[in-house]
Image: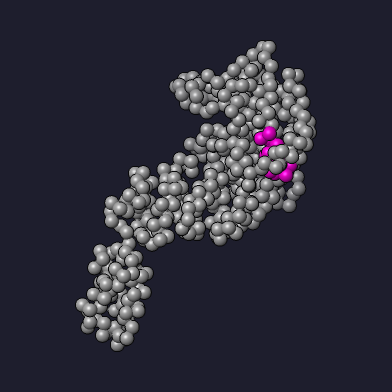
């Protein structure tokens, strides 16, 4: 009876070296409160100066989603007090954002759906309150103050937690492809607010929404939205009204709870920042950025399909992340590697180990050239696929190299035909009775001969070649 409606506001930290309005470093993980300068703190008399790199990154994003880039946009002060915002206002964009319109495609249950984007604007991040460091007190780390963000606001066009997660993943993948953010969700480089309401199935009027603030994992977004859909459904089914409010998601309890209602909502008193000139963007800058766009996911997928002959499924997984796609390409860049075998290996083995140990591509303990060393041995049938898996586990867990393991353990399969010829001849000579039986129709004895050759070679014979030789030699 109720149709969920969801719109997301995503905050993406841009990976510029310095802050959006100051020369302070944006490095993550430095000692607390060592990276906010007087400008980031809004001390009296300071003058912010816009970081051009942040503007270029916002334009790059806008172009990638087919949006309009404003030739002039304005920075405004959004006034509110919070302990992690000592200057009392955040510099953001209000009436004229740098990017407006555009869209991104998402795939839900094999269907492609277009999600429209309302706007994306530049702003500065605030500092960070830390509540779990001291028992009775909260701590403030201002290092993050002034880190450039783009806030990407979607239209309320998603209708399930799954759609919202797919949208979030598409944007996440895009900003990483564009190289404008590392998208690290644990470090807070990529986080979102989810707005959720319910609407009568045949209605066209949006219901009252709740906004869940600052969610920083795909799983939490999914859980928070599903929880909120249930909560609102219960209320509406009982004729209780939904209050417009801001809520927080608590992962440990898997529930959302009220933070502040609309009545308590801030009036931000936006006004143009008198210290910053309007941002003027000429068409030459836009053209430059357009001409230097990296290959994006859709194009890369097409290329993977045609150049490497991959299946849709495998190509989709490999291009889902830019670094993963680059890992694959460096692996198959070596002569003698079968492109499909490499794709299957990365998707089944490598990703299984990565998921289990929660390891990002750039920290894989097995480098692309390590993996290609292993795959070369598999593609040339020096070792079997099964042996390959055992070797890979040692490579991933102990940092051993494929060729070293194969040499040390004497694992080379015997694929040398003349060597196997002799063994096969011996087996036939020593089992002439069975040969007669086989030749007079007892075909299931074939396995017996294969087994004898395997026994003679200590299991190292290449089974494919053994099969071929036996078929040939056992003919009457
Ligand atoms: P604010 O800035 O006050 O949060 P906006 O109008 O900018 O409000 O909307 C923010 C987000 O909320 C957008 O992503 C929009 O799509 C979404 N949204 C607006 N109304 C609704 C609604 N009734 N239900 C679900 N999402 C909504
Ligand atoms: Mg909002």
Horizontally, residue 414 falls left or right of residue 307, namely left
Q: Nearer the viewer, residue 427 or 191?
A: 427
Q: Confirm whether the magenta stretch covers residue 62.
A: yes
Which quarter of the figure is the C terminus placed in? bottom left
Q: Residue furthest front?
A: 418
The range drawn in magenta is: 56-67
Q: Say which residue appears at 52% left-offset and 28% top-offset.
A: 28
Whether residue 397 is visible: no
Q: Say which residue appears at 57% left-offset and 24% top-offset.
A: 25
Q: Is residue 72 above or below residue 40?
A: below
Whether residue 291 is visible: yes
Q: Nearer the viewer, residue 141 or 299?
A: 299
Q: Residue furthest bottom?
A: 440
- Residue 277 lies, in percent from the top left, at 76, 23
* Colour mapping: one colour
Horizontally, residue 147 falls left or right of residue 341, namely right
- Residue 347 lies, in percent from the top left, at 48, 53
């Amino acid at each position: 009876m109720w149709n969920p409606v969801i719109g997301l506001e995503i905050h993406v930290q841009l990976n510029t070296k310095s802050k959006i309005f100051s020369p302070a470093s944006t490095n993550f993980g430095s000692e607390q409160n060592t990276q906010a300068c007087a400008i980031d703190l809004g001390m009296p008399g300071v003058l912010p100066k816009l970081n051009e790199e942040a503007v270029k990154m916002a334009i790059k994003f806008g172009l990638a989603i087919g949006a309009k880039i404003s030739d002039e946009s304005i920075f405004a002060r959004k006034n509110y007090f919070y302990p992690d915002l000592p200057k009392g206002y955040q510099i953001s964009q209000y009436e004229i954002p740098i990017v407006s319109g555009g869209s991104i495609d998402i795939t839900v249950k094999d269907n492609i759906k277009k999600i429209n984007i309302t706007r994306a604007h530049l702003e500065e991040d605030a500092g960070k309150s830390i509540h779990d460091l001291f028992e009775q007190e909260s701590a403030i780390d201002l290092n993050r103050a002034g880190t450039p963000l783009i806030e990407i606001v979607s239209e309320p066009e998603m209708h399930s937690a799954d759609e919202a997660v797919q949208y979030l993943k598409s944007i996440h993948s895009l900003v990483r492809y564009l190289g404008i953010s590392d998208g690290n969700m644990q470090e807070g480089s990529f986080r979102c607010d989810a707005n959720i309401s319910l609407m009568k199935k045949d209605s066209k009027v949006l219901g009252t929404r709740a906004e869940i603030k600052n969610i920083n994992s795909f799983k939490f977004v999914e859980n928070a939205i599903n929880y909120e859909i249930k909560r609102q459904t219960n209320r509406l089914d009982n004729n209780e009204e939904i209050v417009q409010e801001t809520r927080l998601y608590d992962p440990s309890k898997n529930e959302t709870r009220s933070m502040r209602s609309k009545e308590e909502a801030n009036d931000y008193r936006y006004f143009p920042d008198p210290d910053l000139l309007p941002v003027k963007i000429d068409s030459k800058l836009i053209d430059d950025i357009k001409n230097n766009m990296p290959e994006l996911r859709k194009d890369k997928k097409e290329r993977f399909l045609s150049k490497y002959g991959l299946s849709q499924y495998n190509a989709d997984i490999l291009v889902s992340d830019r670094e993963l796609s680059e890992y694959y390409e460096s692996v198959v860049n070596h002569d003698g590697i079968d492109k499909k075998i490499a794709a299957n290996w990365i998707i089944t083995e490598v990703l299984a180990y990565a998921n289990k140990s929660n390891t990002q591509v750039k920290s894989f303990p097995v480098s692309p050239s390590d993996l290609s060393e292993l795959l070369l041995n598999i593609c040339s049938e020096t070792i079997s696929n099964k042996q390959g898996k055992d070797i890979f586990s040692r490579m991933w867990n102990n940092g051993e190299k494929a060729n070293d393991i194969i040499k040390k353990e004497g694992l080379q399969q015997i694929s040398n035909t003349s060597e196997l010829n002799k063994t096969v001849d011996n087996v036939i000579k020593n089992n002439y009775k069975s040969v007669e039986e086989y030749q007079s129709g007892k075909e299931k004895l074939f396995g017996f001969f294969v087994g004898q050759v395997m026994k003679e070679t200590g299991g190292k014979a290449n089974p494919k070649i053994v099969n071929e030789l036996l078929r040939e030699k056992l003919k009457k």
